[in-house]
């Protein structure tokens, strides 16, 4: 069996966490003769599938080799957002003078206390994902490494679990990119960065995707000198350039040194720290840091599953599935990061719901029917759903684009949060929403209104006719509805109105 993710330090909070999600005293149950559903992996996809199936009366076995809750609870969403909440509060205090609030004695970030708070909250949340809770739900929980032994059986800890249907929900892990010298230095990933107890004076981050940008801003706001290195131009390369540029400008203001278009990266360990040699925009750099975070590259957790014995095909990005999330063995399904290009907790949740319908009830639900938003939790946040201009152009779809800047939204002005916008793309000549991007302090909350409209086929005009409380930043979305409504007032229609009003005067 592979080693468990090591949760450091071994304080009372991490001990509480481990006692919930991988209790050392746990004894695996005696297996049933046959299960309706056997699930390998107890991250979000596996937990949602297990709870729902057991609640419907199915005989369910759940196999986990590491920590229940998966990346999200242990080394992903939960600890990172706990860290970011403290970092953003620190920035609010730092910038309070802009609103006329002056602190006499300055402020001080106690990083050990920040991390202890994060561990405390993570332990508190872990009860929801605990072995005990799922056992009480009627799920047979098996701790150990699961391997397929045939097209309808899995072995774990010496026991054989026979199944009618199975689900692969083993998720993914950080993968080391091919950087010269990487093997010679100690580096952090999302699995180890949350074990820090002291603030590193100098931090290097390789990869300016969501994880890299969030962590770079957090450490800068805590007081570290931060170097953010990205091979492509700018940061958040999968987002609209003007949206990611706003986030970049705030990171730079926070003190992050952004080295984009980074080429020829080399790493070495010297007495004064980790040396990062690279070229960026035709300039050479030799950066020295105390800690290095690798935030680029993911690999699916499939190596130990013995997929060949089950007749399940896979590729370098994960398990091969069709639109109903069936693998090449129609008894076996997959959900979550192990098979999806959308590596988000909420995507795994809703993929699990598709698996329940299709595996247990012969449903025909399709993953392609899901409308999946996402958000990067920097300050400001950057959220997106559906198509952007580039995607629409690649698909040959003609669109109309409506953009509302936050410096024209009263609540954003009052909050001193005017850097950002909300943008919606509609099918040309109609109010059918095809996609949206939001850059705002709570963009992740704001995007849900658009996602709801897209999911239930509500047009932008419907949003414009919906009363929003004043003043809120979500008023920006209503203003987009007004923009669309104004496009319907063509010169011909306006002339008709003028004649009618003149006649009724």
Image (spheres, helix red, strand yellow):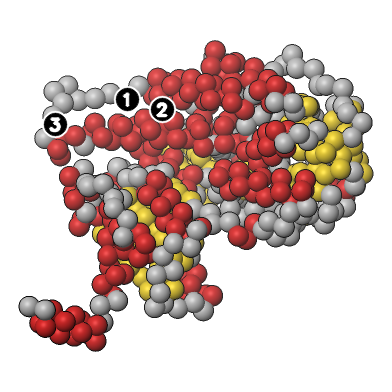
Kindly report which numbered mark, 2 or 1, lies closer to the viewer in this rendering: 1
Q: Residue at x 50, y 58 (%)?
A: 456
Residue at which label 1 appears: 109
Q: Residue at x 11, y 79 (%)?
A: 504
Q: Dot 1: few (<14), some (14–19), or many (≥20) neighbours within 10 Å?
A: some
Res 119 label:
none
Res 199 label:
2
Residue 51 horizontal/vertical position (percent): 68, 33
Q: Is residue 450 left or right of residue 50?
A: left
Q: Quadrant of the C terminus?
A: bottom left
Q: Is residue 267 left or right of residue 248?
A: right
Say which label, 2 or 3, has the lower sequence index.
Answer: 3
Q: Secondary structure at mark 3?
A: loop
104 relative to 453, above or below: above
The image shows a total of numbered marks equal to 3
Residue 46 horizontal/vertical position (percent): 69, 38
Kindly report which numbered mark, 3 or 1, lies closer to the viewer in this rendering: 3
Residue at which label 3 appears: 101
Q: Dot 3: few (<14), some (14–19), or many (≥20) neighbours within 10 Å?
A: few
Q: Are marks 2 and 1 in contact (CB under 8 Å)?
A: yes
Q: Is residue 378 left or right of residue 487?
A: right
Residue 448 horizontal/vertical position (percent): 43, 50
Q: Secondary structure at mark 1?
A: loop
């Amino acid at each position: 069996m592979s080693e468990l993710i090591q949760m450091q330090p071994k304080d009372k909070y991490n001990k509480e966490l481990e006692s919930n999600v991988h209790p050392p005293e746990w004894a695996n149950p005696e297996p049933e003769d046959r299960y309706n559903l056997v699930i390998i992996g107890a991250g979000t996809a596996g937990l949602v599938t297990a709870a729902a199936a057991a609640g419907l009366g199915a005989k369910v076995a759940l196999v986990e080799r590491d920590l229940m809750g998966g990346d999200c609870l242990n080394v992903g969403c939960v600890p990172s957002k706990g860290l970011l909440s403290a970092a953003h509060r620190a920035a609010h205090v730092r910038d309070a003078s802009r609103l006329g609030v002056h602190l006499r004695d300055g402020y001080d970030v106690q990083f050990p206390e920040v991390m202890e708070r994060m561990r405390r909250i993570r332990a508190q949340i872990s009860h929801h994902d605990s072995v005990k809770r799922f056992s009480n739900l009627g799920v047979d929980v098996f701790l150990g490494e699961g391997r397929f032994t045939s097209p309808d059986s899995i072995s774990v800890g010496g026991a054989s679990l026979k199944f009618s249907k199975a689900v692969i929900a083993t998720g993914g892990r950080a993968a080391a990119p091919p950087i010269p010298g990487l093997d010679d230095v100690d580096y952090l990933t999302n699995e180890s960065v949350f074990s820090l107890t002291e603030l590193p004076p100098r931090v290097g981050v390789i990869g300016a995707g969501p994880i890299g940008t969030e962590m770079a801003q957090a450490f800068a706001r805590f007081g570290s000198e931060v170097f953010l290195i990205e091979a492509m131009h700018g940061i958040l390369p999968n987002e609209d350039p003007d949206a990611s540029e706003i986030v970049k400008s705030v990171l730079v203001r926070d003190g992050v040194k952004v080295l984009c278009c980074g080429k020829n990266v080399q790493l070495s360990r010297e007495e004064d720290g980790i040396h990062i040699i690279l070229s960026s925009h035709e300039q050479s750099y030799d950066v020295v840091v105390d800690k290095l975070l690798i935030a680029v590259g993911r690999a699916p957790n499939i190596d130990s599953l013995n997929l060949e014995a089950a007749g399940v095909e896979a590729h370098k990005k994960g398990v091969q599935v069709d639109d109903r999330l069936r693998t090449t063995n129609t008894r076996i399904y997959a959900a979550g990061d192990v098979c999806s290009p959308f590596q988000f907790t909420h995507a795994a949740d809703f993929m699990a719901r598709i698996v329940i319908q299709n595996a247990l009830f012969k449903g025909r639900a399709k993953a392609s029917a899901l409308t999946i938003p996402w958000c990067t939790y920097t300050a400001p946040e950057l959220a997106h759903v559906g198509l952007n201009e580039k995607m629409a152009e690649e698909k040959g779809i003609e669109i109309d684009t409506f953009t509302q800047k936050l410096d024209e939204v009263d609540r954003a002005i009052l909050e001193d949060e005017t850097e950002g916008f909300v943008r919606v793309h509609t099918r040309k000549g109609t109010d059918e929403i095809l996609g949206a991007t939001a850059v705002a302090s709570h963009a992740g909350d704001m995007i849900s209104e658009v996602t709801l409209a897209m999911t239930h086929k509500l047009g932008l005009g419907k949003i414009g006719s919906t009363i929003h409380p004043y003043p809120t930043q979500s008023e920006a979305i209503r203003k987009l509805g007004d923009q669309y409504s104004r496009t319907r007032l063509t010169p011909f229609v306006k002339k008709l109105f003028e004649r009618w009003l003149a006649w009724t005067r």
